[in-house]
Image: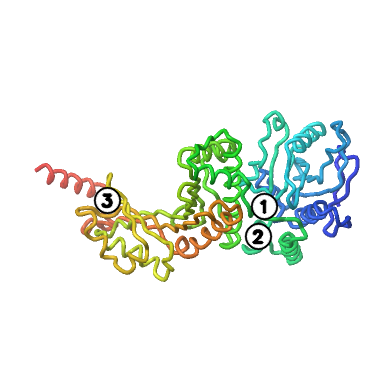
Amino acid sequence: MGRLPDFVKSGEPARLFPVLADTSKEGRTLSIFLACLESVGGFGRALLGGLGQKVGTRGRIDTFTEVVLTKSAGDAKHRPDGLIVVNTGKSTWTALVEAKVGAAELTNAQIEGYLNLAKLNGIDAVITLSNQFTPLPTHHPLIVSPVFTRKVSLFHWSWGNVITQAHLLQELGEVEDREQLILLSELQRFLLHPSSGVKEFDQMPAAWSELCESVAAGGVINAKNQQCQDVVGSWHQLLDRITTVMSRQVNNHVQIAMGRAEATDPTERLKKASAALTADASLAADIVVPNAAGPMQVSADFRKRVVSVSMRLRAPGDRKSTKARVSWLLKQLSGTEPKDLHVRLFWPGRAQVTQYPLATLVNNPEITIDERPGMVVSSFEVLLVRELGAKFAQRKIIVAELVKSASQFHASVGGRLTAWQPKPAKIVEGKLEPASVGTEALRDEVEREALDRAG
């Protein structure tokens, strides 16, 4: 049992079996989570590693609940749910924890109050846990002024990500101790039960339906409008839901592709998506599945009321005809159910892209032979396209459709495709020299070749 730090007036060690009132759902769920974070070494190291805290095998993680700090910010309602203390032997790192379950959401007033409280007591960070998703722990669901995070770091874990981390550690065999493995399995089982208050993202906000109606009526999307920002924020949560679900399905870390600027600054990611929504009335993002032939793009088009999932890959350069290249693709997709699947063919230069239903190509691959005389297809894009019509505006259906479509696309397409790679260059016949040949002989050979070309 760890010792309370000096800046803590009182507190209880996190309990695996907390004795709390039935109404204290948040306290119960957090206590069980913190107890496992402390007791299962690999789990604690994985989650804290995402915050930049490397905890070695000799490092110690202590967790507490019902914490009362020595210095108060003058507001009694700002009482943190928990505290994490990491001692590596050389340094100590501390973080306040605020947890939400069910429909409860984090608020700026509360989190800014905790950041001030942490600063006052010399605490390094504030960590929030809720059902709100973010792609990285360094991204927060709230937009907090940098004034509050100059001396105190702010991080966020979604409960969905916690479940995924527990699942992957078990499936990848990264926890060998039997007792710790049982704890991790029970944590996952508990968090997935409705009584825990943990709920994965399953519904867009009202702004989604409102924007659908506006676009259908010919309205203009304004990137600075709160409606647009709410839609983009929910889109990002939907993407995070897709990656957590797929991570558990493939037993590996599935991630959203982001540039350095977007990964560093969440507001940059928000601006980029808002600009795309304003310009094209659509949202799109690339998802990276480990070892896949390429990124998988998911998109939602408000004008067409269509969702799509696609993957693009280069045509094999060692096949000289379009027919042979198309056959190479179709062979990989053999046995795939072609319903809702299409194939786009990209041609050299500015030649127009062509597209066919996969079923058409399977039944008649010869159709592409005379399409672009003198040209050979350069790349392919395989698409799963679903027209939702009025269902596109329904807040729960759009989430379920995109999560299902992404999983189905990987199962039927992404998990089958292999990127083409050129074979390594071979030594030209007659150029292989015996090991005894020295540098003088090689120089003479080069000179002879040069004379032959000159003359």
Query: Helix, strand or loop at disc 2?
Result: helix
Marks 2 and 3 close (CB-CB < 8 Å): no
Marks 2 and 1 close (CB-CB < 8 Å): yes
Q: Which residue is mark 3?
A: 438
What residue type is disc 1 on? Ala
Q: CA distance from mark 2 to mark 3?
A: 55 Å
In the rendered image, which quarter is residue 146 located in? top right
Residue ID at (26%, 63%): 367
In the rendered image, which quarter is residue 226 located in? top right
Sequence-earlier tag: 2 or 1 = 1
Quadrant of the rendering where the C terminus is positioned? top left
Sequence-earlier tag: 2 or 3 = 2
**Relative side of 144 to 63, left or right:** left
Query: Helix, strand or loop at disc 1?
Result: helix
Residue ID at (72%, 52%): 44
Q: Which residue is mark 1?
A: 46
Which is nearer the eye, 100 or 255? 100
Q: Is residue 323 above or below residue 63?
A: below
What residue type is disc 2 on? Leu
Residue ID at (85%, 38%): 77
Residue 169's disc number: 2
Q: CA distance from mark 2 to mark 1?
A: 9 Å
Count residues near mark 1 (Cα–Cα under 10 Å), then give few for <14, some for 14-19, many for 20+: some
Count residues near mark 2 (Cα–Cα under 10 Å), then give few for <14, some for 14-19, many for 20+: many
Furthest residue to the bottom? 335
What residue type is disc 3 on? Gly
Q: Is residue 199 above or below residue 452?
A: below
Where residue 323 sits in the image (x, y, percent)? 26, 62
Where residue 370 sits in the image (x, y, percent)? 21, 59
Where residue 247 sits in the image (x, y, percent)? 58, 58
Q: CA distance from mark 1 to mark 3?
A: 55 Å
